[in-house]
Image (cartoon, rainbow, N blue to C red):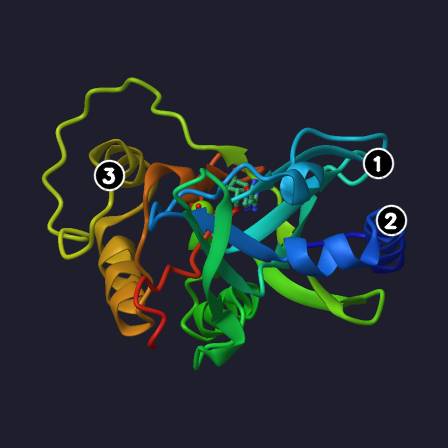
Amino acid sequence: MIYDKEKLVQETSEFLATIHPDDLMDSLYCSVIDGDWEMADTERHRWMKGGNSVFQTIAHGLTKIVLFPKDMQDVVVKIPFIGINEYAYTENDDLKLVGRVDFSGLKSGDYCERESTVYKNAVQAHLEKFFACTEYVADALGFVPIYASERCDPFYSDGMTNRVCLSALSGLDVPNDVVKVLARQYWEDELMDLEAFLLENNVSDLHEGNWGYGKDGKLKIIDYSSFCETFKD
Ligand SMILES: Nc1ncnc2c1ncn2[C@@H]1O[C@H](COP(=O)(O)OP(=O)(O)OP(=O)(O)O)[C@@H](O)[C@H]1O
Ligand SMILES: [Mg+2]
């Protein structure tokens, strides 16, 4: 993955500096309401939506914020959420903070850090072609860790109706449309190795949104940090 690191840090830092420091720190906690594992659409998180003159798109899931720089089409910037704020509605329909989970309390650290560790392991196992590279870049503004990841196109099913008779990946919850594409693009032996690696590294949560097409048109995993619902790992 080749990109201008200095520029990436500068653009990201300048953008983060436009957010009020109190809001920034608070918004690095993902918010959920009434135990619903969907990120709540709060005022504080508005900057994570849409785009601006530097980042064409800003996306997020439950564990990371993802920025797409306009002038660096091969990378995305990933920023880990620090944790989750759990809210509940009161009788008056106000939101009340009822709990806070700190991801740094997890053995594996933040979710981007976990991704970069899994990637390093994948390189050692010669399986890196199955993963969009994620690596640590710097702490923007001195306290917001930013990571770079190889930009991929979102997964789509190409509509080909190949019957899949793979035993590889059957031990993991990978969507059928994803398996169909993998079965055409890779050898079964390679997929068996991938499955063993994913199990060994506790990589789960491999829904369609966590796969993407690399520049060479091959399918790979773009989110391999998994998700720890109990936060006890
Ligand atoms: N390498 C990438 N290339 C292109 N888009 C990406 C990449 N990584 C992430 N994205 C986009 O950003 C979104 C959020 O990133 P990611 O899946 O890593 O975060 P997450 O918070 O762990 O997601 P979730 O917990 O919802 O699965 C993805 O669903 C995808 O749309
Ligand atoms: Mg994801």
Q: Residue 41 location, x and y as percent? A: 54, 36
Q: Residue 54 location, x and y as percent? A: 84, 36
Query: Which residue is the site of mark 1?
Result: 54
Residue 11's label in the rendered image is: 2
**SS under mark 3:** loop
**SS under mark 2:** helix
**How dense is the environment of label 2, judged by Cα within 10 Å: few (below 14), some, or many (20 and up)?**
some
Q: Are marks 2 and 1 in contact (CB under 8 Å)?
A: yes
Work out whether mark 2 precedes mark 3 in sequence or the reverse, and give the earlier one.
2
Q: Quadrant of residue 141?
A: bottom right
Q: Residue 32 location, x and y as percent? A: 44, 49
Taking depth in this image into account, of 213 and 87 the one nearest to the observer is 87
Establish if 136 lies above or below 47. Answer: below
Q: CA distance from mark 1 to mark 3?
A: 34 Å
Tell me which amino acid carries mark 1: Val
Taking depth in this image into account, of 9 and 34 the one nearest to the observer is 34
**Which quadrant would the C terminus be assigned to in this image?**
bottom left
Q: Residue at x 90, y 51 (%)?
A: 14
Q: Residue at x 26, y 31 (%)?
A: 177
Q: Quadrant of residue 22?
A: bottom right
Work out whether mark 2 precedes mark 1 in sequence or the reverse, and give the earlier one.
2
Query: Which residue is the site of mark 3?
Result: 175
